[in-house]
């Protein structure tokens, strides 16, 4: 039985995607040590003066970040001194104070709640990052897979409820 957890919509339409955390979004975040050295950006345009920690998806660096400020969609290209195809490496760089990350809330919730990372500009609505459990066929949805899915949905729901912009209309 092959299953996987992935953020975003599956690129392969033949896969069955079961939602785990459909309301999950990205957040801008940085370590207090980075913010003490470089200052905290208060507007998106200020990201140009900051070291942004970039994630590589496939062969493409994810350096085009999109947000909604309540009135309009804002997209900008950011830059930084490092990128990785390992999302946890990007998280660890952020915790170590290397720069600003644009990460899934589920990836950084524990760090934010522990004070290792701070969410920047929380009033912004950041890109959706729905988490799905993927499998090739509905026939793979055995009792153990369904129990795993139920446990993941429950855990992700409790993490999502700890970030106020994820509850409520339109989020």
Image (cartoon, grey):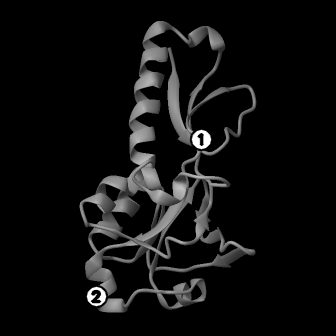
| Residue 14, image quadrant | top right
Residue at 41%, 86% in the rendered image: 40
Q: Quadrant of residue 78?
A: bottom right
Indicate which disc residue 22 carries. 1
| 57, above or below 51, in the image | above
Mark 1 neighbour density, 10 Å: few (under 14) some (14–19) many (20 or more): some
Q: Quadrant of the C terminus?
A: bottom right
Residue 153 can be seen, yes or no:
yes
Disc 2 target residue: 36
In front of the other: 16 or 162: 162
Q: Is residue 72 left or right of residue 7?
A: right
Between label 2 and label 1, give the one nearer the viewer.
1
Residue 80, position as x, y percentages in the image: 48, 79
As drawn, 164 above or below 16: below
Q: Nearer the viewer, residue 63 or 22?
A: 22
Q: CA distance from mark 2 to mark 1?
A: 34 Å
Residue 81, placed above or below residue 23: below
């Amino acid at each position: 039985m092959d299953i996987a957890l992935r953020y975003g919509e599956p690129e392969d339409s033949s896969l069955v995607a079961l939602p785990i955390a459909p309301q999950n979004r990205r957040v801008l975040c940085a370590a207090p040590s980075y913010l003490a050295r470089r200052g905290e950006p208060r507007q998106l345009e200020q990201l140009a003066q900051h070291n942004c920690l970039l994630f590589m998806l496939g062969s493409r660096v994810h350096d085009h970040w999109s947000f909604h400020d309540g009135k309009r969609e804002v997209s900008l290209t950011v830059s930084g001194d490092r990128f990785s195809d390992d999302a946890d490496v990007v998280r660890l760089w952020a915790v170590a104070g290397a720069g600003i990350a644009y990460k899934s809330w589920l990836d950084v919730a524990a760090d934010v709640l522990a004070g290792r990372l701070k969410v920047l500009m929380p009033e912004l609505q950041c890109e959706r990052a729905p988490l799905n459990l993927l499998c090739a066929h509905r026939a793979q949805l055995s009792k153990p897979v369904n129990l795993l899915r139920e446990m993941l949905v429950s855990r992700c729901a409790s993490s999502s409820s700890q970030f106020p912009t994820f509850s409520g209309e339109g989020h």
